[in-house]
Image (spheres, helix red, strand yellow):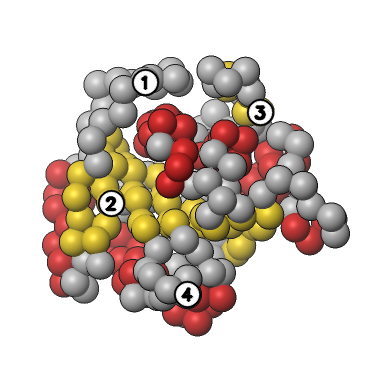
Amino acid sequence: DILQKPTGDSVTLSETVAIISQGTTGLVTWDAALYLVEWAIENSAIFSNRTILELGSGIGLTGIAICKTCNPKAYVFSDYHHCVLEQLRENIHLNGFVLETEVMDLQGPKITVAELDWHCVTKEQLSELQVDVVIAADVVYDPQITLSLIGVLQQLSTSETTGNPPEIYIAFTVRNPDTYHLFQTELGKVGIGWQVVPTHTKNLFLYDLQSDIILLKLLA
């Protein structure tokens, strides 16, 4: 797929047509990722010259678009499934980027791909990334995964690697209100608040505009 943005840049993606492929949902682009990209382009100052960590990067649309349009200092893509990580690296290369480990004199943002297991990642590992902003799209869809995600968010929200905890933004489609309410409840249990980020004004990509997509900014 080739997605064209108003800047004239394009994002080239290799992805599967199946919702679930090779035991994972991470090989397809979801609507909340497109929504998050649109919001990021309108709010590029949040990302400019900062280090970004993306949780559950999937095949990379969100991060690749942010790297092309928002001028981050560094971008850490992360996921866990080996097939997703392989496809993610391929898509990064398809869009003309190289990983930090592949070149000494890097132009543009410093890009890395991290294998991140939410079940066992430590606060120390997250602190080493030295991130300013954390984002994720469509990672709130399954109660078991939600609880693991909450643990990661709790560790990130109490991390002060850059002097302050990172800003955290989570975008997702509300498919099941109970799952959304569970996410809110579990955030409250670990002392994390949230606010709904207002809807952006421009629709740059084709997706179901009737979907109930929400972007939350978490508040430690």
In terms of depth relative to the viewer, which is nearer, 5 or 186? 5
> Disc 2 designates what residue?
217
Task: Classify residue 79 as left or right of residue 168.
Answer: right
Spatial CA span between label 3 and label 4: 33 Å
Instruction: Count the marks.
Output: 4
Q: Earlier in the sequence, mark 4 or mark 1?
A: 4
Name the amino acid type tagged 1: Lys
Q: Which amino acid type is shown beneath numbered disc 4?
A: Thr
Q: Is residue 62 above or below residue 10?
A: below
Q: Earlier in the sequence, mark 2 or mark 1?
A: 1
Q: Is residue 105 above or below residue 120?
A: above
Q: Could you say which is closer to the camera, residue 16 or residue 42?
A: 42
Q: Splitting the image into 4 quarters, where does residue 145 fall?
A: bottom left
Q: Is residue 159 left or right of residue 73?
A: left
State the residue position of label 4.
161
Element assignment for label 2: strand
The foreground one among 186 and 170 is 170
Instruction: Indicate the position of residue 105 as horizontal and vertical percent values.
Output: 84, 55
Q: State how far apart marks 4 and 2 are (Cα).
A: 19 Å
- Other residues around mark 4 within 10 Å, as few (<14) / some (14–19) / many (≥20): some
**Label 3 sits on what residue type?**
Thr
> SS at mark 3?
strand
> What's the CA distance linking mark 2 and mark 1?
20 Å
The residue that mark 3 highlights is: 12
Residue 202 marker: 1
**Is disc 4 placed on a helix, strand or loop?**
loop
* Element type at mark 1: loop
Q: Nearer the viewer, mark 1 or mark 3?
A: 1
